[in-house]
Image (cartoon, coloured by chain):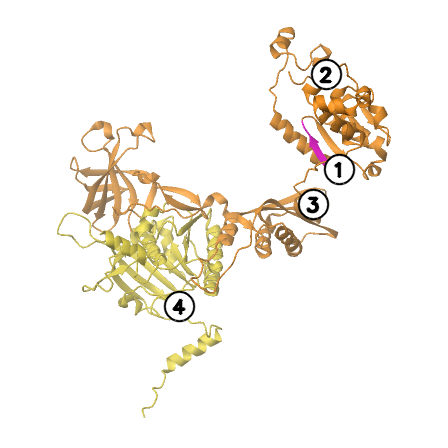
Amino acid sequence: MLSVDPAARRVGLRPGTPVAKAQALHPGLTVMDADPQGDREGLEKLALWFQQRIAPIVAPDPPDGIVLDTTGADHLHGGEQAMLAAMVQRLRDTGIAARAAVADTLGAAHALARHGRARMLVVPPGGAVAAMAELPVAALRLPDDIVDGLQALGVSRISPLAGMPRAPLALRFGPEVARRLDQAFGRVGEAIVPLRPVEPVEVGRNFAEPIGAAETIARMIGTLVPPLCRMLEERGQGGRCFDLLLHRVDSRAEAVRVATGRPVRDAGRVNRLLCEKIETIDPGFGIERMVLTASWTEPMGMRQAVSLLGEAEEPDISDLVDILANRVGTQALYRLAPVESDMPERACCRVPALAPDETKEWPDRWPRPMRLLPRPEPVQAMAELPDQPPVFFIWRGVRRKVRCADGPERVFGEWWKEDAEWTTARDYFRVEDISGARFWIYRAGDGEHGETGSQGWFLHGIFG
Amino acid sequence: MPEPEPRPALEVLREQISRLEGRAGRRRAVLPFGLAEIDGRLPGGGLALGALHEVAGGGGDALHAAAAGQFAAGIAARTRGRVLWIVTRRDVFAPALMQAGLSGRRVIYVEARSDVDVLACFEEGLRHGGLGAVVAEVARLSMTASRRLQLAAERSGALGIAIRRWRRPAGAADFGQPTASVTRWRVSVLPSVMLPVPGVGRPRWRLELIRARAGDEAVFDVEACDGQGRLACGRLVENRLALPAVLADGPGAEEAGRRRARA
């Protein structure tokens, strides 16, 4: 077991107990798998939270700690003691049991927070040596084998260790012991690598008077977009998703989100996309604050637009695609790409409108109908078996006499895609009736063997 | 020294009118069919670019607009650049467009939920100007809507084709209502020419040019779009002419050449 909660600790379980033994002792025990990766991510999130609220330099200290450089930040929270109390209280409110310590150095604070007697401890400046004297040597962030070695020598507290001559220690355990001691006592500096927050690209604006008219909202969007695009440009990024939050006077928020197919930082385009959505905004009694965020950004380099030499570039239609996609939805905007399948229903697959061009084409062996009915419609027909086209057929109540026909084009079921198509076959005919209308009809089955299909006729497409 | 021929009064008048309309200095580009018979009847010698055109199926084809769709695909294939195809029903079969010369790589489909959405997307597409052609399948097209579309097309120079397609046969009566489109076509299927062997010959259509701005109405019997690259341009046999989808100088020329080489 890696960690136990207070209830488990009360019944005598400790980290390091084998799970089987613990379960034998306490049958109702809840065991959860360790998730170091998840823990690390959670710790990072928590560190970000601290950074936004407490101090600017914050780093996660895996596996179980967070380091803050509170220099110059404690007065904002009413002094160090009050700051610690507030932090621990906030963590307890969210269900996290925490210990905290403030000290001159990272090493000392680290040791005191984990091994000190008090849950919260503020060490006055210069008091680290005294405060750490009685702590075990394990508090010095030393590897386990060095700690064991020191234990074997009878050194278990920090104060005797600090008093020992350095040279024999370094000879026996390497430079690590002296380095950690110096770090804890502030003789050697130790930098905190601060967490760099992914700052949202965000522009906000407050209004003295609530606004509500569509034209005013459009104008205000027009003032928010250019600074946002400049911010994106400074970072060398383009936005894929833009969120506009409108805070209303009745403390509700309206949100508008537009997405683009490619990274964009052209103010005109973003403005256009957002203004298209104004009609979906309900301003209520008025909007008092607008915040525009580029919530999904991607790197976007500079690109040479047009050169005078050579051939003209194909016009960029990604802006049109964005406008249409935000109107009808991304799903409803597509290109059709060839699929290697003889079944007409499966000949096409949808690809995104801006997907790279495919190299294949549909085979051009037989004429294909302009309209393919979504489902083949059964028709009554009379035909000679096994492979003659029908003489006439009745479709949607109209009897059509066949004037001439092409076929059959036999299509076999694709058993590797559908079990039901193991033996099936279709015979497709292109038929023209006496009025000149041309249809694509097929017989389910090969006309000879019953297992290949029902031998019924279906109309599947209409030729131009 | 011979006197310079006096310009016909009509020409002068037309010029004046176009100056009044504010289109002076903007020569109308056209997309010729490559058939003298048809191009000669169209003002400017071809289908005007930067304009809205209407196509509908005749007779039983009014509901499916299969021939009309193929006709539109053949026109769109001869433009340059991507093509936006706006539909409400998903029954366009892309391999057929390819056989009319319109490769699947060029066509972007928009599936609109309603006629209102179709018209909105149609207008966006026409206004953009970076597309070769915008094709929309739409049932109702009011004067106001078509005027907006026509203006958007005029401003960007895009070719707009409205395929009129109705849910019920009765709706086809709507095709008589006036709209702002520059030409209006009705495409009906004709029986193909009987082959000496069993089989279906090359499809034939009756093209009715019902309305052409500054032009006369006319009827042509043609052989359908040909994506095979057989450039039977001007193959006039009595009243029949071939309507090639792929012209030698069109964007599909290299494909056509490839197919020819294969054949």
Q: Residue A14: which quarter of the image?
A: top right
Q: Residue at x 32, y 50 (%)?
A: B98
Which amino acid does the dot numbered 4 rest on? Ala
Of helix, strand and loop, which one carries label 1?
helix
Q: CA distance from mark 2 to mark 4?
A: 83 Å
Q: Which residue is mark 4?
A: B29
Sequence order check, earlier mark of 1 and 3: 1
- Proximity of marks 2 and 1: CB atoms separated by less than 8 Å: no
* Magenta part of the chain: A57-62
Q: Is residue A228 left or right of residue A338?
A: right
Sequence order check, earlier mark of 3 and 2: 2
Q: Which residue is mark 3?
A: A247
Q: Position of residue A401 (x, y in %)?
A: 20, 45
Which amino acid does the dot numbered 3 rest on? His
Mark 1 is surrounded, within 10 Å at the Cα level, by few (under 14), some (14 to 19) or many (20 or more) other residues, namely few
Q: Chain of mark 2?
A: A
Numbered circle sitting on residue A53:
1
Of helix, strand and loop, which one carries label 2?
helix
Q: Which residue is mark 2?
A: A6
Q: Position of residue B221 (x, y in %)?
A: 24, 61
A264 vs A349: above or below:
below
In this view, which residue lies farthest toward the top? A25
Q: CA distance from mark 1 to mark 3?
A: 22 Å
Q: CA distance from mark 3 to mark 2?
A: 43 Å
> Do discs 4 and 3 belong to a common subunit?
no
> Do discs 1 and 4 belong to a common subunit?
no
B167 vs A426: above or below:
below
Task: Give the foreground label among 2 and 4.
Answer: 2
